[in-house]
Image (spheres, rainbow, N blue to C red):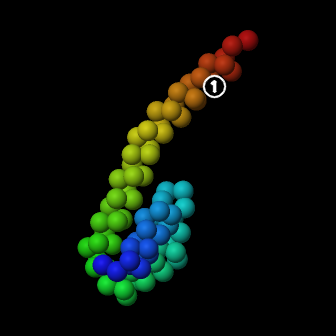
Amino acid sequence: MAQVCCWDLLHVSRTHPSYTHMYAPGMRRHIKAAIKLGTTLEEVMEVLKLCVVQGVQTCNLGVPILAEAIAAGSATEARP
């Protein structure tokens, strides 16, 4: 795989598919560029799978912290 393909895949993996960003035009642009330069569809799919795993792991770590913060805020509000 050419270095330029890796650059486009890096853009695909870092920003465009993330839960907070999800910028479809950017994903489309970089995926098309990577495929044009020789990246296989399987390689693109592997990158996207890694993005999903990263997003799920972020939720697994973040949701319990959010729940604690909400509980602490509720306890503070209940006090006179």
**Residue at the extreme bottom:** 36
For disc 1, the marked residue is 73
Q: Which residue: 37% across, 57% down?
A: 52
Residue 50 against residue 78 in the figure, above or below: below
Q: What residue type is labelled 1?
A: Gly
Q: In this view, does 4 lie to the left or right of 21?
A: left
In which quarter of the view is residue 10 placed? bottom left
Q: Which residue: 42% across, 52% down?
A: 55
| x, y percent for residue 67 | 51, 31
**Residue at the extreme left:** 42
Taking depth in this image into account, of 74 and 49 the one nearest to the observer is: 49
Q: Is residue 1 left or right of residue 9?
A: left
In which quarter of the view is residue 51 placed? bottom left
Q: Which residue: 37% across, 87% down?
A: 36
In which quarter of the view is residue 71 placed? top right
**Residue at the extreme top:** 80
Taking depth in this image into account, of 6 and 74 the one nearest to the observer is: 6
Q: In this view, does 78 lie to the left or right of 58?
A: right
Q: Which residue: 34% across, 80% down?
A: 2
As helix, strand or loop, the secondary structure at mark 1 comes to helix
Q: Is the residue marked by circle 1 packed among few (<14), some (14-19), or many (20+) residues within 10 Å? A: few
| x, y percent for residue 79 | 69, 13
Residue 48 against residue 1 in the figure, above or below: above
> Can residue 12 be seen at all in this image of the molecule?
no
Quadrant containing the C terminus is top right
> Can residue 42 be seen at all in this image of the molecule?
yes
Taking depth in this image into account, of 20 and 4 the one nearest to the observer is: 4
| x, y percent for residue 59 | 44, 44
Quadrant containing the N terminus is bottom left
